[in-house]
Amino acid sequence: MTTVSEATPLSSAMRSRDATVRRFAFTDTVFREATRSSAVLVLLILSGVAVSLFAGSWEALSKFGFSFLTTEAWNPVTENFGALSPIYGTIVTSAIAILIAVPIGIGIAVFLTELCPRPLRRPIGIAVELLAGIPSIIYGIWGLFVFAPFLQTTVQPFIIDIFHNVPGLSSLFAGPPYGIGLLTSSLILAIMVLPFITSITKDVFDTVPAVLKESAYGIGCTTWEVTRRVVIPYTRVGIMGGVMLGLGRALGETMAVTFVIGNAHRISASLFAPATTISATIANEFTEADGQLYTSSLVALGLILFVITFIILAIARYMLMRIDARTGA
Amino acid sequence: MSTSLALHNRRKRRNGVMMALCVVAAGIGLAWLALILGALVYKGLSGVSLAVFTEMTPPPGDAGGLLNAIYGSIVMTVIGVIVGTPIGVLAGTYMAEYGRFSKLTTVVRFINDILLSAPSIVIGLFVYELLVRPMGHFSAIAGAVALAILVIPVVVRTTEDMLNLVPNALREAGAAIGAPRWVVIRSVAYRAALSGIVTGILLAIARISGETAPLLFTALNNQFWSSNLNAPMASLPVTIFQFALSPYEEWQQLAWTGALIITLTVLGLSIFARSLTGRREDR
């Protein structure tokens, strides 16, 4: 785009065209770099999270070392901190929540894709997704004032009565019924992750080619057999991705659990006992933590949570990417 | 013949049972929604009055309102959206327009999806280390930054998805009349994807307006009216957290009312957002 010749009558027009092209090229470069640096910023945020958590927890990690992960004690007075009971609470509550939510979520997805009358499909789907939009603090306040008292007065005494002389189960469901505790948190978490699992399962069910289902129906399969033998095997990876995504949410969920877990730093065999999770511990104690080591230990808990959820979510995304690649979506 | 009939009946029975269970599962899902909303309306509605919107949060045992908390929530949400949206839209633009097939886009998409579901309390800790500790005190700015970080992944995701839906023929038509790339993006691609991008922003607002965990140790809380961005600021979710766990009846009632306000806002925003596009993105 250099000037052709100074002598032509068009030269001034060419010059102004040149200037315009240069201006366009300049603006385009600026815009492209702005978008590129924003994209890079997303990476920087995540690495910033990792670096700052690591830096903040350095004091605790260097003092306690690996035993931080295996110590149950959590004593701000003697400044002796261990992450075992929050880790235990986090994993147990999330695992129970997933065990409850997965069958229900798959059931709803089957209902929505196979059974539901067409006009109702969208409204019910949206209603389930609205559950996902309700802020977690709402689940918390509902759990504390409505759900926990209900469990305390009706469900828990009943369960304790049934199992009190069954070996094994008697310690799992040992009283007294506080209402709040591990099981209550698990149930609230199950309600919270249900919409995530449902909507992803429904999405991957929709990717099953109609021909596959029709040929199964054609040889006389029932709806259940089509679901069990065709739809679920075809979408297994996607369902696992959805479950992992739900698990990631459950592990990091803070406010709902903080309300109903009871915040007790100990590991009890009973599911009715108060306990704590990583996120609940941070939410409850961070602003009141005095002393560098206390704060640093709480940040270390955050780092552990970050690493666990990062791994789970990465696996979830990897699985969902595989099913996306297959459908070409 | 009789065995095959028995088999047929068994299969039909089994199918009936499993399908009934699926209907029950759907019933459970809808029942929870009804139970939670019902409890919210029942407990929250009785506390709704003009005072809630005109008076400050009261000291323990007194009547009062939620004005400073509502104000704080709006201020921090607005700043969070104003800061987070341009970054999210630009990053999404890079991924869908300039670098659609680049390595960077694949990595950013993966990381962004993780950020999308990362525990918000961890984001709170990050902003605490980033801003609160160096500044030496809690502040509304720190809270707004934490919210902005939550806005970005939602907006990135929807912007990229929506721009990818814009037909390439439109872009080529723009390029064919000599428009430079950024003009094509601005006047063709953005315009075609506008409603989808707005949906993403609304969903982001819906998400952050109920977030509590990232505000706990960034913006902290404030019993009094404060419009100073460099000082702790009250917010509706944190106030609900504090009031609900208190032993005072007036505070608990205000917590329920605040919870009702937040839920209606969030549900209203997400229903409105969905009505704009009719398709779901925030996976």
Image (cartoon, coloured by chain):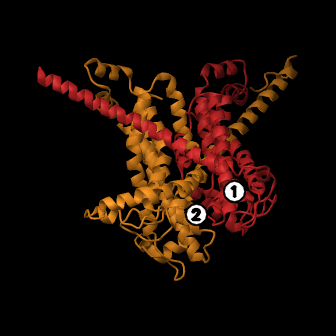
Chain colours: A orange, B red
Q: Is A158 in front, or is A57? A: A158
Whether residue A48 sits left or right of residue A174 in the image: it is: right
Q: Mark 2 belongs to which subunit?
A: A
Q: How many marks?
A: 2
Tell me the SS state at disc 2. Answer: helix
**What's under tag 2, amino acid-wise?**
Ala
Whether residue A235 sits left or right of residue A6 in the image: it is: left
Q: Residue at x 46, y 69 (%)?
A: A83
Q: Is residue B63 depicted above or below A79 in this figure?
A: above
Q: Position of residue A313 (x, y in %)?
A: 47, 49
Tell me the SS state at disc 1. Answer: helix
Identify residue for label 2: A283
Identify residue for label 1: B254
Q: Is residue A22 depicted above or below A135 in this figure?
A: above
**What's under tag 1, amino acid-wise?**
Leu
Residue mark closest to the camera, 2 vs 1 = 1
Q: Residue at x 58, y 66 (%)?
A: A284
Q: Residues within 10 Å of mark 1 (few under 14, many from 20)?
A: many
Q: Position of residue B66 (x, y in %)?
A: 75, 55
Whether residue A184 sits left or right of residue B278 in the image: it is: left
Q: Quadrant of the rendered structure where residue B96 is?
A: top right
Q: Which mark is residue A313?
A: none
Q: Is B79 in front, or is A327? A: B79
Q: Residues within 10 Å of mark 2 (few under 14, many from 20)?
A: many
Can you see residue B109? no
Looking at the image, the residue that sits furthest to the bottom is A78
Q: Is B160 in front, or is A5? A: B160
